[in-house]
Image (cartoon, rainbow, N blue to C red):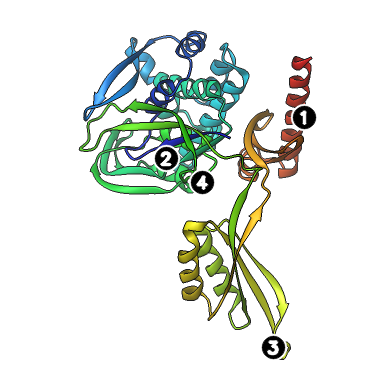
Amino acid sequence: MRTLYLECYSGISGDMTVAALLDAGADREKLLAALKSLPLDGYRVEITRTFKNGVAAQDFHVILEDAHSHHVHRGLKEIFPIIDGSKMDPSAKLLAKEMFQRLAQAEGTVHGKAPEEVHFHEVGAVDSIVDLCAAAVCFVDLKVERVCCSPLYEGRGTVECQHGCIPVPAPAVCELAKQHRIPLHITETQGEMVTPTGAAIAATLADTFDAPSLANIKAVGVGAGKKDFPQANILRAYLLEEPDKEAADWVWCLETCIDDMSGEALGFAMERLFAEGAVDVWFTPIQMKKNRPGVQLTVLCKDPSVEAMTRLLFRETSAIGLRKRRCGRAVMARTRKTVETPYGPVSMKECTYGDIRKASVEYEDARQASLSAGVPLRDVCAAAETAYENMQESKKELAK
């Protein structure tokens, strides 16, 4: 499986992502042609080599030639036609719009507005449009099947923006982390390491916020940040070849039976197990000694987590013993496809196993689109499924 791993130990921003993806092998000329086709003026792009703490890195720089363009307040209604009016790959267009949708959702929550009502510098600036479109073009060009991302390392203190002095992490970054369950690691570094644009990219691309456990490195791209920190301010993008998930996948199954805990306490234990990295957790109603009703608590986890899960089970439940066994699994390979619906971009989870293929709507995307558009969830799901089926039919026609 072709996997992209984003190592965000110095944070993540739009320009760092583009630079890292270019350095990892994305087609530079294809990117420049896509950006040139954007109906957008007042900027130019420089792609150069630089060094950060002695480490060679790619630098992607959007230079504003018209100071006025930097302060134009655009919203999604203005940005989406700019993207649609370009000659970007259709998949890249959908991906860029999904990134903007997530960013606008977060900024709207921060400012008490609906996403489509957000009109301000952070979403509408030329450099943000170029960065997100460029990231989408490069990502699609790399043709990866899965994206892993490390926790986002962030600084502390304050940062100046159009609204004045705000705390780090920026409110929009915090909101994106909350909405998309992105783990933040706050460091002692003074200053902003994670920008809202970078967080929106991570929220959109990442299938998981964890490093692959076993993979061969095919390429490493290094993207430079504009600031200087004590550590090298770089984002590394690894292109990896992971073992085929269809071939073999092993987990540990931990089980224990409980008949003396409240529902609230069991629910809390489940939350803690998931927070510590459990693959899955569930309860099965059972009948125990003396006809007492109880539950069987089952936990699936990976090798490195067995001891931590065991300790957590003993600490958070009344269990005094548990069963452990190693289980082989057959797992369908999973990728994410973005489709455009009348209610905005929605992700579809596409699963394959040999010649077997199935797809389902990503609930969180459908939920957000339902709330934003004020339509029933079922309407959003139906529209996404129809768009996905149409996309598959188009692929079949092109293949003929």
Is residue 276 in view from this perspective? no
Within-10-Å neighbours for mark 2: few <14, some 14–19, many 20+? many
The alpha-carbon separation of the residues under discs 1 and 4 comes to 28 Å
Residue named by callout 4: 179
The alpha-carbon separation of the residues under discs 2 and 4 comes to 10 Å
Q: From the top left corner, tell me how far across and down residue 141 is, in percent.
A: 54, 20
Earlier along the polypeptide chain: callout 3 or callout 2? 2
The alpha-carbon separation of the residues under discs 3 and 2 comes to 52 Å
Which picture quadrant has residue 199? top left
Q: Which mark is residue 172?
A: 2
Q: Is residue 314 left or right of residue 392?
A: left
- Under tag 1, what secondary structure? helix
Within-10-Å neighbours for mark 3: few <14, some 14–19, many 20+? few
**Count of numbered badges drawn on the protein:** 4
The alpha-carbon separation of the residues under discs 2 and 1 comes to 34 Å
Type of amino acid under label 3: Lys
Residue named by callout 3: 289
Tell me if residue 340 comes above or below residue 171 in the rendering. above
The alpha-carbon separation of the residues under discs 3 and 1 comes to 52 Å
